[in-house]
Image (cartoon, helix red, strand yellow):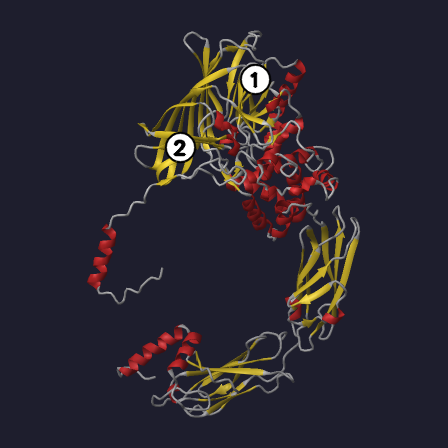
Amino acid sequence: MRKKSSPPAHALRRPLLALGAAALVAGLISSAVAPAVAADPVDGARTAGDAMFPNVGNGGYDALDYDIDLAWTPDAVQTGSVVAGSVVATSTMTARAAEPLRSFSLDFEGLVVDSVTVDGTPAAWQRDSDAGAIRHKLIVTPASPVSGEFRVTVAYHGVPQAHVDADGSYEGWNATTDGSTMLGQPVGNMTGFPHNNTPGDNATYSISLDVPTTLSDTAGQGSAPAAAVSNGELLSTTPSADATRTTWAWQQTEQMASELLIISIGRYDVIESTVTLSDGSTIPAWSFVDSTSTTANKATVTSAVDQLGPIIRNLESIYGPYPGRSAGVVVDRVPRGINYALETQDRSFFPTRIGFSTLVHELAHQWYGNNVSPTTWTDIWVAEGMATWSESFYAGSDGFGAGTPSREQQFDAWSGTPAGDGAWSIAPGAQTDSASLYGYQTYDRSAQFWAALRVAIGDDAFFDVVRQWQTRNAGTSKTGADLLALAEELSGRDLRAFYQDWILDADKPAWPDQFTLSLTSSATAPLERAATASYTLTAENTGLVPFASATATLDVGGILNRASIDSATLPDGVALTGDDLVWTIPATDPGQTAATTFAATVFDEASGGALTTEAAPSLGGTCASCASTLAVREYPVDAQAPVITGDTAVGSTLTATTAGWTDGTSFTYSWAVDGISIPDATTSTFTIPPTAEGRTVTVTVTGGRAGYLDQTRTSAPFGPVAAVAAASPSASPSASAPAAPRAPGQLGATGSEAPITAAVWAAAALIGGAVLSVVAVRRRRVARGEDSV
């Protein structure tokens, strides 16, 4: 987000059936009128849980809107090199409490609190400040606990001060040679107004700035029109009755994190323009350049303003529609402490002049960092990495320029930093020290991460992730873990190890392999029985590093159901486990190709269908052709159909014969009555039990190996009804026959007429499903003499 001036190089539900009707109704009425028990009020947390700034940010409420009314006046007598001045202000935060709060806190550094009201009623308050711990709390205790939406108004005054970061840089309220500028990132805006100082709590803003109409330098020289700059849209500029002061009213209707608020007061030339977006609509642009800047520096600002439209439209093609309602830049001559560019929302801040690459960086932040902000400061790498990557992409021939492609630019930066360099000692997603927040890990390594992710998942998935991050999350704050989840979802890849290496490990990550995978097969189709099919896998290294972990995995289940692969004959680097054949691609230099071949032999009994397989490359791999289908010849089946023989009388034995099937074929049998399987009936014979009278007896014969052609046949007539048989690769010949009428009896197991037990019926219920319920109804009807079993 901030580019420093000198950055580094880089309940069990109880059944109601037991309840009486009256009791049930009474219970329901009782529960309907029972009053809800109100939650006891609590104290809102005095932290947002940010590892980087553990004493900054607050909990218990969600800020919805800030209304800041601030008047700034320079001292009548100036003695220093920068303007001394003071403010009188009122700030109102509208928020929503997640639960009743008896107290809550805001972050507020310096300045004097005059009064605090909550929903118009005076509230008690106290300050808790420890600069060393970066803790500056305004603790508010309302006259009565707040719940739901509430408003807290703080009136204050005084001389605002800069906030000094742990790394020695300045932010917050800084005096300039002709006014003051407030910059927030990461936590400095608490020097200007009380608020929930965390990027995880976005809100809308109204900012009214009452300032002198003209300003001069500290010596009283160079009097020139003044301006008061902020975010969003400029609603009005209203002069006082005597015209000595002017109120600049700004409104930010888009969600904005507090660190993105800018207030800059000084002698400015104001440039009003419009920006045409990709959809043809226009938005206003307000830009400001220090009136005392040189002609050359002003020219860079004019050029930047002219480039706002083209750059924004190009970035829209990557990130999606521009998220703001206005645009612009702020360029000021500032003290050394704030001599850095910063992506304040809508109009970014630049010291002195604007460089094109930095302009691209800060405009990219309007999406990454502003439209979607980090939840905690540890996640700053997501946005800073993307904005830094955008510079190389924009200039590269793969983007909008003619320079070195961004992949090569980021690879060179990665390659040029030795593994032992301390730059790798901080993991972007695990950093906790705010003193090193704006280091190599936040900018350079994180930009390399984005380039490496593009290599790992391919262009289509990568640009989908980049755009969906904005589309799905606009106006919210998200974490690095959220980014990982989105990338995995959209790419269909397991990226946990990749993310761990690049974002969570404190060492130099591995640049990902990049390759094109091809699968070819060689055989005369349709394949005869016992024929051999040859498969070749080829991997072309299209990346920038030799293969280190590239693999190709083939799902060979579609081969193994009709053919065999002999593991003993597989080449080195190829292993078969279950239905997966994995090729560990050997080390291969960029521009070179690796290949391997294996064979499959068609079963002697196979008939019809096809040998099918598809290869999947590991991260960094794309497919040129990764699927193969080889047809298997269909052989006619001349074997005699299964025949059910035997008397249909109760007590007689039925036999399923499978004469004529292929030698060596094995069979299993299952018998059923009215669709209810008989658990013990697993042989080729079945004795019809007494209770089978008038019912349908069926048998299913299963046998053979995978590879037989699916088929349906009809057996010879059996009794008065034809018996039906079917054969298939997995559950084949079946037949049925009605038993002769007879008095009710007990359904028995195969080869006996023993009574069927409750356990057997239970087992039958599990198998027969709904059929059992029909049988149960018929049993009750038999018991009443209405029917027979």
| Tag 1: amino acid | Thr
Residue 462, located in which quarter of the rendered image? Answer: top right
Task: State whether residue 740 appears in this view.
Answer: no
The local secondary structure at tag 1 comes to loop
Residue 665 versus residue 524: which sits nearer the camera? 665
| Tag 2: amino acid | Ile
- Left or right of 564? Residue 242 is left
Residue under pointer 2? 139
Q: Quadrant of the C terminus?
A: bottom left
Q: Position of residue 704 (x, y in %)?
A: 61, 79
Image: 187 above or below 688: above
Image: 78 above or below 54: above
Residue 502 versus residue 562: which sits nearer the camera? 502
Residue under pointer 1? 176
Foreground mark, 1 or 2, reads: 2
CB within 8 Å, label 1 to label 2: no
Image: 84 above or below 22: above
Q: Residue at x 72, y 36 (%)?
A: 397
Q: Position of residue 558 (x, y in %)?
A: 64, 67
Residue 628 versus residue 216: which sits nearer the camera? 216
Task: State whether residue 201 appears in this view.
Answer: yes
